[in-house]
Amino acid sequence: TNLAVPLSSLAGGIPASIVAVPADLIKKRVVVGVAESPIQAFQQVIKLQGFQGLFTGWQLNLLKDVPFAVFKLSIYEASMKFYLLNINKKRDLTPNEKAGCGIMSGAITAF
């Protein structure tokens, strides 16, 4: 259905952000010099803000990441459908053909 791609993107985007947001927060603290190591950055956040401090900006990241994931997955699905209908009319896509569609969708959404 038309809702499959957005719902799939949402279903994948939310759990991914639960891991990505704290990891990005810790990485940024090390890069800007607030902490000397990821472990120290983690300890600082927990000490100053508690566990919820690891998720600072989580909602804003969702507002950015989920539409991007919907766009990227939609392009991937459309490129596979185009390839099947116009180029490869007789069989399922091979792993290399699927990878090619994925590379194309990644390249388009990178802009």
Image: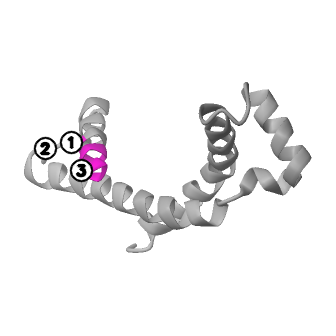
Residue most extreme to the bottom: 2
Q: Residues within 10 Å of mark 2 (few under 14, many from 20)?
A: some
Q: Quadrant of the N terminus?
A: bottom left
Mark-to-mark CA distance, 2 and 3: 22 Å
Q: Which residue is mark 1?
A: 91
Q: Is residue 107 magenta?
A: yes
Q: Judging from the image, what secondary structure is the residue with disc 1 in?
A: loop
Q: How many marks?
A: 3
Measuring 67% from the left and 39% from the top, which residue is drawn there? 29
Between disc 2 and disc 3, the foreground one is 3
- Is there a contact, CB below 8 Å, between mark 2 and mark 1? yes
Q: Residues within 10 Å of mark 1 (few under 14, many from 20)?
A: few
In the displayed structure image, the side of residue 74 where residue 27 appears, left or right: right
Name the residue type under label 1. Arg
Residue most extreme to the left: 86
Q: Earlier in the sequence, mark 1 or mark 3?
A: 1
Q: Position of residue 22 (x, y in %)?
A: 70, 46
Name the residue type under label 3. Ile
